[in-house]
Amino acid sequence: MLKKFLMVGFILIANTSFVYSKQEPITIACLPSEGTMEEKARASYVSAVEGAFIKAGYNVADRQRLEKILKEIKLQDSSNNEDITSKAGKVMKVDYLVAVIVDYWEEQGLNNRAMEQDRKNDTMKPKEAYYITFEHIRITLKVIEVETSIIIAQGNIQDFNIKGYINFFKRDTQNKLAKKVVDKVMKDVKKQIKKKKRN
């Protein structure tokens, strides 16, 4: 009898703690992309960011639906953009909106390695021959809490390549960059959630 009572008690306690330990999944939606990169290329980075959120276990709302809702709200309401964005997030029933900014720029620099090699081999060329172009990409994410319209986390990741040099530096793929930046900002989001639960 005592064994049955202990067994039933153990099962009840285990089930209760299991039920209460589950957290509701976080739902996010990515806002229309911004940045200096060409729009079509930016869209592929936003898709990579959405994919990284999904792989990390978050629910991702449909971006096209969000864009339609944003347009409708803008037509009806001419107040500031923060209110419009927050309203759209509430209509979508998401916890967080994610602003995705993808920047691209080029920079000139000296290829010091090639210059040093030619100096050692006594085959120096004019200095202009050693200039190379670096292609930079930076993805910035801003996580906005829909309930408060406050940015609760922000992070970026940057990578570069040398223009015209195939595989000189192996640039991370869009998916790898997206995963890195999503992991980075979601650590901060989780900290904010824990802090909020304590208060």
Image: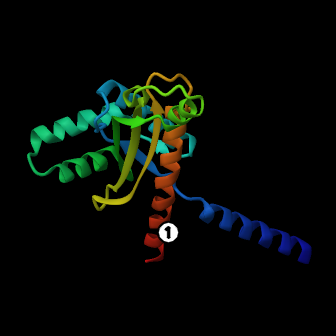
Residue name at image x 52 percent, y 55 percent = 24
- Above or below: residue 4 compared with residue 160: below
If the image is split into quadrants, where does the N terminus sit?
A: bottom right
Q: 10 Å neighbourhood of mark 1: few (<14), some, or many (≥20)?
A: few
| Residue closest to the eye, 178 or 18 | 178
Indicate the position of residue 35 as horizontal and vertical percent values.
29, 38
Amino acid on which the number 1 mark rests in the picture: Lys
Give the left or right position of residue 106, taking residue 53 as reference: left
- Above or below: residue 19 compared with residue 25: below
Residue name at image x 40 percent, y 42 percent = 139
Indicate the position of residue 46 as horizontal and vertical percent values.
40, 35
- Asked if residue 52 shows in the view, the reply is no
Residue name at image x 49 percent, y 38 percent = 112
Q: Name the residue that disc number 1 marks.
A: 194
The image quarter containing residue 64 is: top left
| Residue closest to the eye, 135 or 14 | 135
Kindly state the secondary structure of the residue where label 1 is placed. Answer: helix
- Farthest front residue in view: 122
